[in-house]
Image: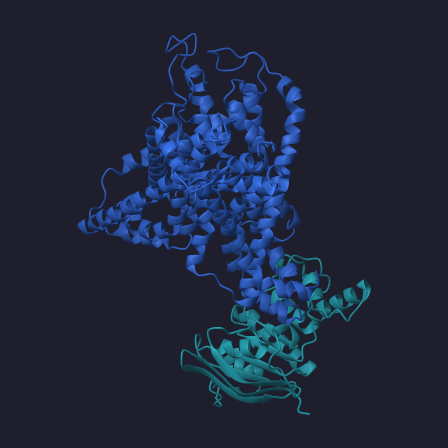
Chain colours: A blue, B cyan
């Protein structure tokens, strides 16, 4: 493309990006609302009717499925948010907190499904926890017959979600805290006799919360409609609504697709209801909080709080990391009987036997992730550069647009997209899966890159221009090289998001595109722990490699440039 | 044709409050000093002259260089060099690459470009520093590299924005003399913005306040 053509196209980048984000959501919603009201010509539905809703209402598990979705979402979000607040309040500015910060990246790079599989291995009746205390403490010679995974209350599902969402909310809170004089605020309150944690909650949290509100909403919407984690840890009879919708979509009886569409629309309504409930909770919490601030309470029981929140952080981090270690061990395990804590022998047999299929799926997974991330990165950079050159600055409301694909549940609009993909004949192609992934990768790439891109010292650009450099030369020779680290970090985030995608891969790929994630989730219902371990490990290794490269490449490129080394 | 840098009726206002009002002609080799307290908006004058967008401000007036009207040209087409208080060397490039970045593409061939960079380093008493990481240089060395980088781009005028305020007292004197001598040797018209009377005296040219009134730096 010539420079001039590029210059003409650049101002259109923001509009194009918004179209890429909202187009699929709107199309997907249309593609699901129509069948929910009987319109599905390919299946003979040519008249509008309420029959799909009647069919949905007739399904006996409906009330339980709805309850499960709502309770899981509200509980997982409230616990994750509460833990995040307490960890920050009790531990900010300490050595422990820096250790927590360092743990965030590895924890975030673990895909949801892998974390859930790891947790499942820990807490299952035949899992590591039971093995660790058997038989000497429990007397169990065989795995006890208790329902832990898939418990009817969804407790293990909630635990699995919390373990993954706490690191995410912590990261968002840390970013928000960077813009607030936290140390001074807390110190000022401390000199007036407030406890450290109380000081943080009273002076910092009210300023942090508005900035992490959209991420909290995203966590809530995700938890209400999650499929992969629910398939691994959630109850089955009935399952949460989103899982049930997927079940109906995959049923050979095509007439069930009408009911699935109605269920998917109901799923959206549930998410909106959860958001409404949270919004009401915010109002109440704000009122209570103001009264608490007015009361002047200096904080009691802070040592207890510190211990509790520290334990919560340690527990949720180790649940993910130890669970993964267990899975890794399983993939190399020879004979490993209950209740032995460690396998009797180690072998490479699983890797040798399954290595071929694993490599092929890893290739597909990486290819999709790299393509979706490249598209997203290109659009995001074009948007940010258009902002720079043409002054097209998004308002605060534009930030909401980024969150639309993260808040409208996948189980709703991706279901509709599948209908469209089938109708247009694009379903099952890699290109369609890449496009679907990009819808979810793009917001995270944008959120990750926008702040560092905007924070770049504009005088550098002015100096370069006064030395005779045009805008393209400034971008490629000065700005992007200087921003290499955040650009690669954003790319690693994008790859991690893409690798973790389950529902879009399955629905848009029509089951024909097999990635590490779809395979890991599919294996979870079987009992082959060695194979599950293999896939969960590979699924984690891919994003981890991305983050490792995002650190290693700039370090290597800039090894002789002290000012470009990572601070700290 | 008039030579030098001319500012005619350059006024800059922020929300109706006038910050700058200057009409002046700077002949080649002369340094015009604009003096005012920090925060008085005098840096925006330089941004305007160099052609940087000033979206929040209401700015107008003609800028001419060697008789040529510069209005409508961006910073990369004006041929005006800019020096800030921070040296703003590109941190990802070596000292030599920083200098080569400023060198016009009309100087062709690897060998000739290397020679030009080496000669500039020699002028700044930094011979052999081409491969160095800018972050390993002292403040005074970095300031000199920044000046040489600007000069290598063959500007027809120079703007200096508090260029010495980050340097400690001992260094300031030497860097200042080096900068001003180089400007006079090369016969460049220059505008210096500063709040430091010492700078203004050393510049040796006329001194005005942001509203164009002559000042005595004392």
Task: Give how far across and how far down residue B70 sits, in percent.
Answer: 62, 82
Residue A177 shown left or right of residue A543 in the figure: left
Residue A270 or B29: which is nearer the viewer? Answer: A270
Residue A118 or A198: which is nearer the viewer? Answer: A118
Residue that extends furthest to the left in the rendered view of this protein: A295
Residue that extends furthest to the bottom in the rendered view of this protein: B1
Q: How many marks?
A: 0
Examine the rendered structure and indicate whether residue A492 appears above or below residue A231. below
Residue A220 shown left or right of residue A114 in the figure: left
Residue shown at 39% from the left, 30% from the top: A240
Task: Give how far across and how far down residue A432 sits, in percent.
Answer: 60, 42
Residue shown at 37% from the left, 55% from the top: A181
Task: Give how far across and how far down residue A217 sits, in percent.
Answer: 38, 45
**Residue A186 visible somewhere in the drawing:** yes
Image quadrant in which you'd find residue A384:
bottom right
Q: In what quadrant of the picture does the N terminus of chain A appear?
A: bottom right
Examine the rendered structure and indicate whether residue A255 appears above or below residue A144. below
Examine the rendered structure and indicate whether residue B214 appears above or below residue B128. below
Task: Give how far across and how far down residue A44 sits, in percent.
Answer: 51, 37
**Residue A328 visible somewhere in the drawing:** no
Residue A546 or A295: which is nearer the viewer? Answer: A546
Residue B177 or A380: which is nearer the viewer? Answer: A380
């Amino acid at each position: 493309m010539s420079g001039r053509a590029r210059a003409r196209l650049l101002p259109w980048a923001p509009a194009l990006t918004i179209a890429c984000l909202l187009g699929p959501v709107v199309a997907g919603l249309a593609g699901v609302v129509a069948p929910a009201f009987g319109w599905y010509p390919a299946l003979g539905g040519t008249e509008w009717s309420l029959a799909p809703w009647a069919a949905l209402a007739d399904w006996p598990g409906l009330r339980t499925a709805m309850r499960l979705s709502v309770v899981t979402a509200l509980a997982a979000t409230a616990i994750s948010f509460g833990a995040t607040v307490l960890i920050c309040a009790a531990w900010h500015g300490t050595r422990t907190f820096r250790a927590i910060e360092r743990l965030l990246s590895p924890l975030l790079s673990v895909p949801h499904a892998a974390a859930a599989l790891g947790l499942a291995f820990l807490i299952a009746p035949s899992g590591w926890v039971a093995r660790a205390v058997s038989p000497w403490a429990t007397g169990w010679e065989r795995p006890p017959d208790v329902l832990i995974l898939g418990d009817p209350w969804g407790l293990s599902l909630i635990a699995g979600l919390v373990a993954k969402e706490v690191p995410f909310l912590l990261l968002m809170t840390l970013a928000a805290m960077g813009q607030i004089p936290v140390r001074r605020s807390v110190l000022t309150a401390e000199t007036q006799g407030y406890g450290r944690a109380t000081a943080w909650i009273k002076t910092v949290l009210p300023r942090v919360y508005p900035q992490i509100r959209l991420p909290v909403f995203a966590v809530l919407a995700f938890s209400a409609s999650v499929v992969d984690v629910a398939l691994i840890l959630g109850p089955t009879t009935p399952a949460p609504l989103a899982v049930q919708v997927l079940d109906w979509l995959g049923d050979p009886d095509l007439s069930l697709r009408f009911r699935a569409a109605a269920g998917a629309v109901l799923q959206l309504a549930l998410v909106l209801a959860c958001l409404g409930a949270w919004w009401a909770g915010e109002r109440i919490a704000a009122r209570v909080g103001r009264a608490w601030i007015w009361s002047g309470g200096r904080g009691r029981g802070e040592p207890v709080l510190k211990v509790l929140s520290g334990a919560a952080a340690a527990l949720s981090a180790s649940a993910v990391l130890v669970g993964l270690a267990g899975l890794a061990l399983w993939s190399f395990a020879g004979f490993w009987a209950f209740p032995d804590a460690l396998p009797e022998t180690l072998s490479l047999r699983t890797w040798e036997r399954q290595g071929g299929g694993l490599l092929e799926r890893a290739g597909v997974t990486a290819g999709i992730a790299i393509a979706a991330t490249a598209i997203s990165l290109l659009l995001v950079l074009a948007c940010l550069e258009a902002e720079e050159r043409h002054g097209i600055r998004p308002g605060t409301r534009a930030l909401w647009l980024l969150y639309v694909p993260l808040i409208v549940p996948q189980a709703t609009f991706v279901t509709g997209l599948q209908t469209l993909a089938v109708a247009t004949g694009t379903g099952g192609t890699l290109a369609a899966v890449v496009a679907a992934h990009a819808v979810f990768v793009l917001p995270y790439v944008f959120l990750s890159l926008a702040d560092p891109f905007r924070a770049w010292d504009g005088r550098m650009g002015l100096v370069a221009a006064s030395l005779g450099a045009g805008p393209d030369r400034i971008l490629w020779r000065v700005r992007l090289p200087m921003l290499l680290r955040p650009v690669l970090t954003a790319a690693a985030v994008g790859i991690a998001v893409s690798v973790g995608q389950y529902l879009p891969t399955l629905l848009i790929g029509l089951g024909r595109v097999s990635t590490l994630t779809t395979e890991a989730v599919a294996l979870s219902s079987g009992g082959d722990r060695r194979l599950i371990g293999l896939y969960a490990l590979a699924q984690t290794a891919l994003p981890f490699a991305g983050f490792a490269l995002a650190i290693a490449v700039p370090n290597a490129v800039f090894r002789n440039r002290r000012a470009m080394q990572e601070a700290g | 044709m008039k030579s030098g840098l001319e500012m005619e009726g350059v006024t800059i206002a922020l929300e109706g409050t006038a910050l700058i009002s200057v009409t002046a002609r700077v002949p080649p080799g002369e340094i015009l000093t604009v003096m005012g307290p920090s925060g008085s908006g005098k840096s925006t004058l330089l941004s305007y002259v160099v052609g940087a967008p000033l979206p929040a401000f209401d700015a107008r007036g003609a800028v001419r260089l060697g008789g040529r009207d510069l209005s409508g040209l961006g910073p990369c087409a004006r041929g005006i060099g800019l020096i800030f208080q921070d040296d703003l060397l590109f941190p990802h490039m070596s000292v030599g690459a920083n200098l080569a970045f400023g060198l016009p593409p009309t100087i062709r061939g690897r060998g000739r470009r290397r020679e030009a960079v080496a000669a500039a380093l020699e002028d700044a008493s930094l011979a052999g520093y081409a491969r160095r990481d800018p972050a390993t240089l002292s403040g005074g060395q970095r300031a000199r590299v920044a000046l040489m980088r600007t000069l290598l781009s063959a500007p027809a005028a120079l703007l200096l924005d508090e260029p010495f305020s980050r340097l400690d007292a001992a260094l300031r004197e030497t860097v200042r003399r080096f900068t001003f001598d180089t400007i006079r040797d090369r016969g460049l018209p220059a505008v210096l913005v500063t709040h430091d009377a010492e700078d203004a005296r050393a510049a040796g040219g006329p001194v005005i306040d942001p509203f164009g009134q002559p000042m005595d730096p004392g």
